[in-house]
Image (cartoon, rainbow, N blue to C red):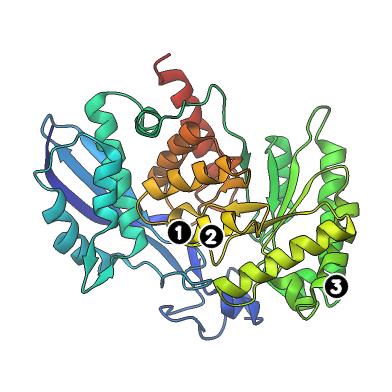
C-alpha cells in the first residue's frame, strides 16, 4: 500500500506556549495573561497561542492516516527548541517530508519513522515537533494498512505485548491548583496533582512554607474525599524553584524534601526538577548528588527529571548514570515517536520509572497516538493530555486506551 499524497494544514493545540523564564522571574499576571516582554528567544509574548500542524497521508485504498505536530508549553527552556510555529513549519514539511514520503510503500513503522527522524534541512535536523507529528501519521498508516491498532503495530515491531489493562495516568492542575485537585480525586487519578509550581515568591515561599502548606492540603483532600481503596501517588513539578529558594544548597534542599515527605504521608511523594542548574551536565551531577544525600539521610522522596533530557541518547545517559529515580519521557520533544518507544523500554529494562509525559499544549490526535504507545510499552504512568482542565485530557487518554483493549486481537 502506497502513500499517494501528504497533506498538512495549520491547527490549534489544547493550551498555550509560555515563556517559563519570564514567569520564573515574576512576570506580572493580568487575568489569564502576563504583562511585560518575553525573555526567551522565539517568543513574541509571555503567553501565546499553541499552534499545531495536522498531517494527513492519503493511502491508495482511500484511507487517511493522521498525525499532529506540536511543541511543548515551555518551549525554549531546558535545552529545548524554540516555540513551534505552523507558518514556519508548513514549507519545511513541503520541502523535506513530502518528497520523502509521497509514493512510498507502507510496510514497517520503525524503519520509516527513523527515516523521517533523520531528515535535515541546511545541515540541521528539522524541528522535533515536525518529526513527532509526521511519524504519528506513519504509525497510523501502518496500522490502517494492517487493520489493527497502533498499539499492536508497536508491540509487533518491538517484541512487546499490548497491556491487558488500562495504563496508570497522571494529571496536571495548571493554575487551578485547588479545584483541579478535586476533579482528579473524583476521577481517581493514579498520580496527582503536578501543581505547576513555577514561581518561588508565589508558590514556594522564602523558606518553602507556601509549598509545604499546599502539599499538606492535597494530602488532606485525598484523605477526606478519596474514599476507601484510593491510594494515589503525589507528584509535584517544581521547575527548579526549591533549589532557587534554598540557594542551590543541596543539603538544605534535601532536608526540606524530608519535611515534604512527612507532610505527604501516607502517600508516596515524587518531586520533579527540584533543582535546575542550567545545563544537562550540571543537572546530572546535581540530581545524582541530591539523590545520594536523600539516601544517606533516609528520606524516601523520588526524584524525577524533565528538562535537560531532550533526546534518546541523553535519556540513556540519565539512566546509565543512575542520576534520577524517574524520567519524564517528554514525548513531544523526542522527535520521531520510535524514540518514545525505545526510551520507555530502556527505562523499564533498567528499573528507572518511565513517566510518559507530554504537554498540555498538544492535540487530541497526538494524545491518542501516545495512548497507543503506552498500551504497547507499559510505562509507569502516562500523562493526561491535552489541555489544563483535567477532564478533557483524562477523557482523551482513558477512552483511547479502552478502545485499544476492546479492539486488540487476543
Q: Which residue is mark 1?
A: 313
Q: Is residue 331 left or right of residue 131?
A: right
Q: Name the image quarter holding residue 60.
A: top left
**Percent position (x, y) of residue 128?**
36, 61
Q: Is residue 379 above or below residue 161?
A: below
Which label was assigned to residue 252? Answer: 3
Nearest to the eye among marks 3 and 1: give it.
1
Q: Are marks 2 and 1 in contact (CB under 8 Å)?
A: yes
Q: Which residue is pictured at 76% across the width and 70% down the height? A: 242
Q: For the C terminus, which image quadrant? A: top left
Label 1, residues with CA under 10 Å away: few <14, some 14-19, many ≥20? few
Q: Is residue 166 left or right of residue 173?
A: left
Q: Residue furthest top?
A: 410
**Percent position (x, y) of residue 172?**
63, 52
How far apart are labels 2 and 1 at the CA level? 6 Å
One can see residue 214 in this view? no
Q: Which residue is mark 2?
A: 317
Element under disc 3: helix
Element under disc 2: helix
Amino acid at each position: 500500500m502506497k502513500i499517494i499524497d501528504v497533506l498538512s494544514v495549520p491547527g490549534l493545540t489544547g493550551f498555550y506556549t509560555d515563556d517559563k523564564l519570564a514567569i520564573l522571574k515574576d512576570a506580572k499576571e493580568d487575568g489569564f495573561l502576563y504583562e511585560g516582554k518575553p525573555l526567551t528567544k522565539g517568543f513574541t509574548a509571555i503567553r501565546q497561542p499553541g499552534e499545531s500542524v495536522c498531517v494527513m497521508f492519503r493511502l491508495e485504498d482511500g484511507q487517511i492516516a493522521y498525525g499532529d505536530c506540536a511543541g511543548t508549553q515551555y518551549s525554549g527552556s531546558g535545552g529545548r527548541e524554540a516555540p513551534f510555529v505552523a507558518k514556519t513549519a508548513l514549507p519545511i514539511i513541503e520541502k523535506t517530508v513530502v518528497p520523502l514520503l509521497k509514493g512510498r510503500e507502507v510496510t514497517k513503522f520503525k524503519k520509516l519513522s527513523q527515516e523521517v527522524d533523520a531528515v535535515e534541512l541546511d545541515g540541521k535536523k528539522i524541528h522535533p515537533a515536525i518529526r513527532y507529528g509526521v511519524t504519528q501519521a506513519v504509525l497510523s498508516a501502518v496500522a490502517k494498512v494492517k487493520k489493527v491498532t497502533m498499539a499492536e503495530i508497536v508491540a509487533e515491531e518491538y517484541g512487546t505485548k499490548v497491556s491487558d489493562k488500562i495504563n496508570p495516568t497522571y494529571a496536571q492542575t495548571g493554575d487551578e491548583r485547588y479545584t483541579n485537585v478535586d476533579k482528579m480525586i473524583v476521577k481517581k487519578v493514579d498520580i496527582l496533582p503536578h501543581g505547576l509550581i513555577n514561581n518561588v515568591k508565589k508558590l514556594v515561599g522564602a523558606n518553602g512554607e507556601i509549598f509545604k502548606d499546599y502539599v499538606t492540603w492535597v494530602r488532606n483532600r485525598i484523605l477526606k474525599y478519596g474514599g476507601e481503596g484510593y491510594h494515589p501517588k503525589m507528584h509535584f513539578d517544581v521547575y527548579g524553584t526549591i533549589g532557587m529558594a534554598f540557594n542551590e544548597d543541596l543539603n538544605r534542599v534535601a532536608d526540606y524534601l524530608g519535611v515534604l515527605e512527612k507532610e505527604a504521608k501516607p502517600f508516596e511523594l515524587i518531586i520533579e526538577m527540584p533543582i535546575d542548574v542550567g545545563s544537562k551536565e550540571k543537572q546530572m551531577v546535581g540530581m545524582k548528588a541530591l539523590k545520594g544525600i536523600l539516601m544517606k539521610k533516609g528520606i524516601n522522596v523520588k526524584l524525577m527529571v524533565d528538562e535537560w533530557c531532550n533526546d534518546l541518547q541523553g535519556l540513556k545517559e540519565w539512566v546509565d548514570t543512575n542520576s534520577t529515580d524517574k524520567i519524564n519521557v517528554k514525548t513531544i520533544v523526542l522527535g520521531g515517536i520510535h524514540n518514545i518507544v525505545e526510551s520507555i523500554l530502556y527505562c523499564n529494562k533498567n528499573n528507572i520509572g518511565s513517566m510518559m509525559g507530554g504537554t498540555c499544549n498538544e492535540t487530541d490526535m497526538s494524545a491518542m497516538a501516545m495512548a497507543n504507545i503506552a498500551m504497547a510499552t507499559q510505562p509507569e504512568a502516562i500523562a493526561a493530555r491535552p489541555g489544563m482542565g483535567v477532564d478533557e485530557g483524562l477523557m482523551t487518554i482513558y477512552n483511547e486506551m479502552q478502545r485499544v483493549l476492546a479492539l486488540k486481537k487476543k
